[in-house]
Amino acid sequence: ELPPYATEALAALEAAGHESWVVGGFVRDALLGRTSSDVDIATRAFWREARGVFEDCGWHVHETGTAHGTITVVIDGHALEVTTFRSDGPYEDARHPQRVSFVRTIEEDLARRDFTVNALAYHPERGLLDPFGGRFDIETRMIRAVGDPDRRFAEDALRILRACRFVAQLGFSIDEDTYRGMLANKGLLPLISVERVAHELSALLLGPFAGDALMSTVDALSAVLPELVSMKGFEQRTPYHIYDVLEHTARVIDGVPAYPLVRWAALFHDMGKPAAFFAGNDGVGHFYGHARISVELARGIMRRLSMPGSFSERVLELVERHDDDIASTSKAVKRALARLGGDAELFAALCDLKRGDAQAQAPRCIERVALADELERILDGILSENEAFSLKQLALGGRDVIALGIEQGPRVGQALNAALEAVIDGHVSNDRDELRAFVAAWRTEREDVR
Ligand code: ATP
Ligand code: MG
């Protein structure tokens, strides 16, 4: 089950007299019957010694984290992380060990690891090493801290989010004492860099059990996403919705495909409902404007987490438009595409979000599921026919418009958009001469009005 490059690396280290083991996610996933791609190795060799052994084998070595005893060796195009047995010294700031000390035994190395399911070591001849009952916890599907939970989360608060992330990825539950330790230390999470927080949240959202994780760990996650609190227990006040916003959101997340754009949008899509309700919206059938409030909340969260602006903008478009009515006609789809700046991938994500949202309704909203399917079919048709729906595809450019006597500035964009609309509506074909004639007429009309 061990990939050949990992066996070779182990054998090379052992032949040089250095006890070495496969550790971490690979062992956990193997016991779960899954193959994970990255293999981590722990070795008694100091990193310089390990580097020497690998270089003698003709393998390339990168010094990726030598302060922590980590190097990366590349064998047949596969990268392996190799780390010297170590225990982390006292922690400062709930983040960084003040120093790492290298230790002599694998048991000491396993003791510094976060959860029992991650504190397993395997060697092809010596078998499984399991000093903390990780195998039992895998069988009973339990996330349990190694050692005293309170101390472990106080040492490194990121582990709180890692626990939530493993729930989302593995579908496990969190042991009671461990969860208590998480809640007791969640106040330390603001000390963790926002990039690392965002990274764990992304991994959580992409997990197959992301919705379950959100529901079951909301009181821990609220330290980084306080907005979740008002969603919890907030009933959607409509005759059709009999469950709360957080639960609905969780179902949507589980119901949409696992790619970052649509999963983040699913997290945010109904976040504004409680606020919309308390702001006096009718609360009987509709939450007027809840999408706009969700957008503002989402914008704030993504800024706080320093998420890339271009990604955030696309997520916000999805949140804002998730409830838009789009007719199942080619024209309507092209207009919607034009509003999204011609971003066909974003439109497909919008279909995924709409379908997930409709599927998560109780009772399931069959017509809206079918509508989302239909919109996606229409999109495919438009793409395969290469029909125009964005300014990029228009056979007329800004220069042509200026050459027709339209002054530089906002008027150029207006003219081009009018031309695109005319093409989408079928009044003009996407042909340069026809479009020039159209713009000329459009200009005269405008001038008459003035
Ligand atoms: P993945 O499948 O996401 O790679 P993984 O368990 O391998 O899961 P990594 O982040 O690659 O997770 O870390 C490798 C191993 O290092 C973990 O299995 C765990 O034993 C240990 N580890 C990682 N981060 C921490 C941490 N913050 N505190 C303690 N141990 C950690
Ligand atoms: Mg790993």
Image (cartoon, grey):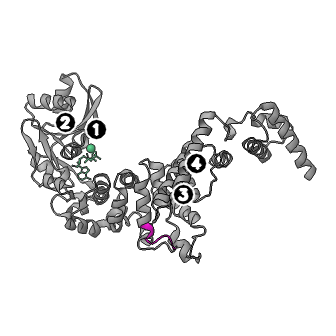
Q: Residue at x 34, y 60 (%)?
A: 212
Ligand 2 - quadrant of the structure image: top left
Please tell me how crowded label 4 is: few (under 14), some (14-19), or many (20+) other residues with Cα within 10 Å: many
327 to the left or right of 366 = right
Measuring from the top left, give residue 181's x and y in whole percent: 24, 67
Secondary structure state at the residue bearing disc 2 = helix
Residue interval drawn in magenta = 239-246
Please tell me whether the stretch drawn in magenta is mainly helix, strand or loop.
loop
Q: In which quadrant of the rendered view does residue 114 lie?
A: bottom left
Marked residue nearer the N-terminal end (4 or 3): 3
Q: Provide the residue designation for mark 3.
A: 367
Residue type at mark 2 is Trp
280 to the left or right of 169 = right
State the separation of the CA atoms marked 2 and 4. Answer: 56 Å
Marked residue nearer the N-terminal end (4 or 1): 1
Disc 2: residue Cβ within 8 A of ligand 1's nearest atom? no
Q: Nearer the viewer, residue 191 or 262?
A: 262
Q: Residue at x 21, y 41 (%)?
A: 69
Q: Residue at x 59, y 76 (%)?
A: 282
State the separation of the CA atoms marked 3 and 2. Answer: 61 Å
Marked residue nearer the N-terminal end (3 or 2): 2
Q: Provide the residue designation for mark 1.
A: 37
Q: Residue at x 60, y 37 (%)?
A: 383
Q: Nearer the viewer, residue 431 or 412?
A: 431
Please tell me how crowded label 2 is: few (under 14), some (14-19), or many (20+) other residues with Cα within 10 Å: many
Measuring from the top left, give residue 110's x and y in whole percent: 14, 49
Tell me, yes or no, whether the two marked residues, 4 and 1, touch with CB atoms within 8 Å. no
